[in-house]
Image: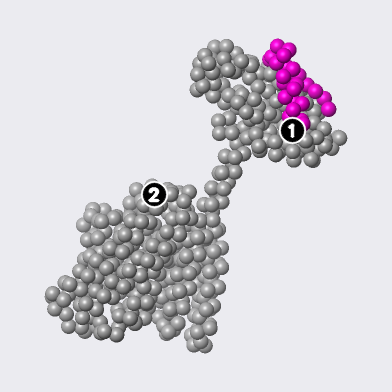
């Protein structure tokens, strides 16, 4: 899509959304549902300064259209001045807000998604406030408002712009990302691919929230009481469930469709007097949803952090702390009839390998040997890195004699490994102990370490055991 076609499409869509906002026109020149603000914010975030021209064209057209709708006399000079002021009032606050959110996400990435969401919500509120304030002044300056109307229109305008940005800007960003793939790349792990949607879940969850909305609006329509309109706030709960159990794209589109249907039904059921309550509920719901979307990300980050703590980065063996924790738990479960065995092994003359061939080859030796050992371990066996070139093995529910057999098999197999860049064989010494059922992990490790030391003293490349 070339820039001319893109600009024309953007102008047409902006004006179409602007006319649709009449559904919830709450005060002169002010709708409490203004999707064009969301489109402008998304376009400025994705396209940057390139979005200013089509938005400006739409602003000039809409100003002339307003004068025609309200039968307001407007000179060419007055139209130009009002249009220019409106475009500046609309694009500068939204452009600055989009710039801040874009840079914040680029700096934090998916790991700082929660912070980016907070910045987005704050920026959306402030940008909408400034846009509404200066927009009202622009229209008033052009003579399209009486002196009393600005104060009647400012709050609805602010609510409408804020709803458009918070609720609808993300869906416009998602739509744009399908055409401009670099947007998807910049958004990192925020998956806006249609393949991420489970259509069965999408339809069922959309039907749920729309059904609840219809119940709330029906109560208001028949009772005409403000208390009934507050039932819409209960819809926050199913939206939180949706945000934490479906894809981001599913949540974004359900929220956008819900907002659109809300505007249409409020207009058709003639409950415009209660529209402000519903839009406050919509904005509150959207804010809760964006924070709820951070929960899966935080859970993933916590899982990754736990994995980093539990695993050695080089060899992927369990970390020392995690291994000892697992050993303590196993010793507490052990009985006289079902004990576990502990093995400590380290490399013979490993320092000489590092000194002669460098640490890169030394790391390759560690990885090769630990990979070999991992392949021979049973499902419940655990290997951990004790430190440097020293490793630990835990064999749950294993007889001492069986543990010795496994250790000897490993000792022989390691010495027969072929490692690229190393001519001499790699050998290891092993210390094997049978753990007492009530023994502390530190005591068992100390006994295994002494058995390993004895293996070293006896000439290395052998297994020394110590029964309970």
241 versus 408 height, above or below: below
- Ranked by sequence position, the earlier of labels 2 and 1 is 2
Badge 1 marks a residue whose secondary structure is helix
How packed mark 2 is, by other alpha carbons closer than 10 Å (few <14, some 14-19, many 20 or more), is some
Q: Up-down: is 169 above or below 270?
A: above
Name the residue rendered at 71%, 38% in the picture: 326
Residue 442's disc number: 1
Q: Is residue 8 in view from this perspective?
A: no
Q: Quadrant of the C terminus?
A: top right
Q: Classify mark 2: helix, strand or loop.
A: helix
Task: Depth check: give the residue in front, 223 or 434.
Answer: 434
Pick the residue in front: 450 or 111.
450
In the rendering, at what x and y percent does residue 134 appear?
A: 28, 71
Q: Is residue 352 left or right of residue 153?
A: right
Q: Is residue 459 magenta?
A: yes
Task: Tell me the magenta residue range.
Answer: 443-468
């Amino acid at each position: 899509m070339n820039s001319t076609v893109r600009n024309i499409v953007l102008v047409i869509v902006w004006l179409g959304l602007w006319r649709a906002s009449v559904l919830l026109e709450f005060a002169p020149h002010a709708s409490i549902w203004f999707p064009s603000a969301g489109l402008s914010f998304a376009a400025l975030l994705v396209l940057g300064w390139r979005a200013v021209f089509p938005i400006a064209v739409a602003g000039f057209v809409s100003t002339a259209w307003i004068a025609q709708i309200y039968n307001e006399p407007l000179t060419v000079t007055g139209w130009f001045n009002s249009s220019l002021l409106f475009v500046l009032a609309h694009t500068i606050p939204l452009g600055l807000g989009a710039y801040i959110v874009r840079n914040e996400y680029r700096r934090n990435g998916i790991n700082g998604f929660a912070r980016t969401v907070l910045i987005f919500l704050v920026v959306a509120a402030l940008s909408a406030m400034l846009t509404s304030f200066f927009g009202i002044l622009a229209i008033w300056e052009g003579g399209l408002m009486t002196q009393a109307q600005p104060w009647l229109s400012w709050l609805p305008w602010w609510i409408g712009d804020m709803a458009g940005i918070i609720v609808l800007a993300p869906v416009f960003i998602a739509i744009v990302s399908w055409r401009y793939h670099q947007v998807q790349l910049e958004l990192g792990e925020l998956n806006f691919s249609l393949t991420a949607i489970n259509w069965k879940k999408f339809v069922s969850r959309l039907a749920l929230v729309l059904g609840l909305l219809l119940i709330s609006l029906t109560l208001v329509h028949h009772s005409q009481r403000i208390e009934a309109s507050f039932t819409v706030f209960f819809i926050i709960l199913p939206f939180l469930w949706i945000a934490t159990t479906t894809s981001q794209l599913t949540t974004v589109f359900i929220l956008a469709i819900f907002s659109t249907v809300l505007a249409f039904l409020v207009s058709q059921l003639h409950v415009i007097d209660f529209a402000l309550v519903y839009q406050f509920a919509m904005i509150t719901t959207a804010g809760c949803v964006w924070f709820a979307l951070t929960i899966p990300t935080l859970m993933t980050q916590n899982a990754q952090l736990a994995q980093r703590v539990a695993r050695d980065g080089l060899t992927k063996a369990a970390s020392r702390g995690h291994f000892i924790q697992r050993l303590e738990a196993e010793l507490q479960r052990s009985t006289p009839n079902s004990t576990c065995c502990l093995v400590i092994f380290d490399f013979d003359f490993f320092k000489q390998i590092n000194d002669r061939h460098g640490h890169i080859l030394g790391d390759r030796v560690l990885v090769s040997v630990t990979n070999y050992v991992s392949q021979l371990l049973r499902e419940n066996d655990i290997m951990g890195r004790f430190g440097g070139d020293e490793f630990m093995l835990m064999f749950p529910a294993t007889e001492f004699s069986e543990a010795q057999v496994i250790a000897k098999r490993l000792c022989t197999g390691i010495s027969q490994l072929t490692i690229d860049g190393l001519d001499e064989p790699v050998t290891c010494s092993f210390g094997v102990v049978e753990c007492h059922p009530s023994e502390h992990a530190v005591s068992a490790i100390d006994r295994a370490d002494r058995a390993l030391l004895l293996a070293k003293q006896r000439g290395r490349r052998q297994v020394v055991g110590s029964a309970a």
